Image (cartoon, rainbow, N blue to C red):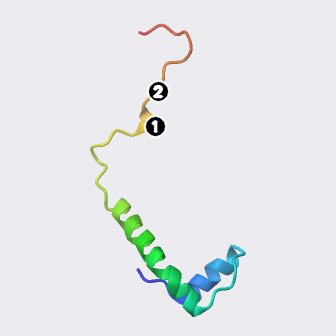
Amino acid sequence: MPVSNETLKRIIAEYGGFELSDAELELVRPELDNYLAELQNLRDLDLSDVMSSRLLRAAEGDEADA
């Protein structure tokens, strides 16, 4: 999903970043594209067989095992 230079400039401005020229944005674009590709890889992961860590509970203090 390509992001336009105008959109990048607005995002940078909203976060109070430095103004970048189009040439400077092109220098960071490969890294941004890599980040977005990795994000898509994470979204595509099939985690249906992975138990949620929120379901696990650690033993508390001196409680005896049941």
In the displayed structure image, the side of residue 20 where residue 32 appears, left or right: left
Marks 2,1: beta carbons within 8 A: no
Along the viewing direction, whichever of 64 and 6 lies nearer the viewer:
6
Please determine whether, in this image, residue 66 is positioned above or below residue 6. Answer: above
The residue that appears at 55% across and 9% down in the rendered structure is 62
Please determine whether, in this image, residue 13 is positioned above or below residue 44. Answer: below
Check disc 1 and give the amino acid type: Arg
The residue that appears at 38% across and 71% down in the rendered structure is 37
Check disc 2 and give the amino acid type: Arg
Secondary structure at badge 2 equals: loop
In the displayed structure image, the side of residue 33 where residue 14 appears, left or right: right
Residue sitting at the far bottom? 22
Image quarter in which the C terminus is found = top left
The residue that appears at 31% across and 49% down in the rendered structure is 47
Q: Position of residue 55 (x, y in %)?
A: 42, 33
Residue sitting at the far top? 64
Return the residue at label 2: 57
Residue sitting at the far right? 16
In the displayed structure image, the side of residue 52 where residue 4 appears, left or right: right
Return the residue at label 1: 54
Q: Which mark is residue 16?
A: none
Please determine whether, in this image, residue 34 is positioned above or below residue 2. Answer: above
Quarter of the figure with residue 46: bottom left
Q: For the residue carrying disc 2, how many other residues have a C-alpha within 10 Å: few (<14), some (14-19), or many (20+)?
A: few
Q: Position of residue 9 (x, y in %)?
A: 62, 85
In the displayed structure image, the side of residue 66 where residue 9 appears, left or right: right
Image quarter in which the N terminus is found = bottom left
Q: Position of residue 14 (x, y in %)?
A: 69, 77
CA–CA distance in space, label 2 to label 1: 8 Å
Secondary structure at badge 1 equals: helix
Q: For the residue carrying disc 1, how many other residues have a C-alpha within 10 Å: few (<14), some (14-19), or many (20+)?
A: few
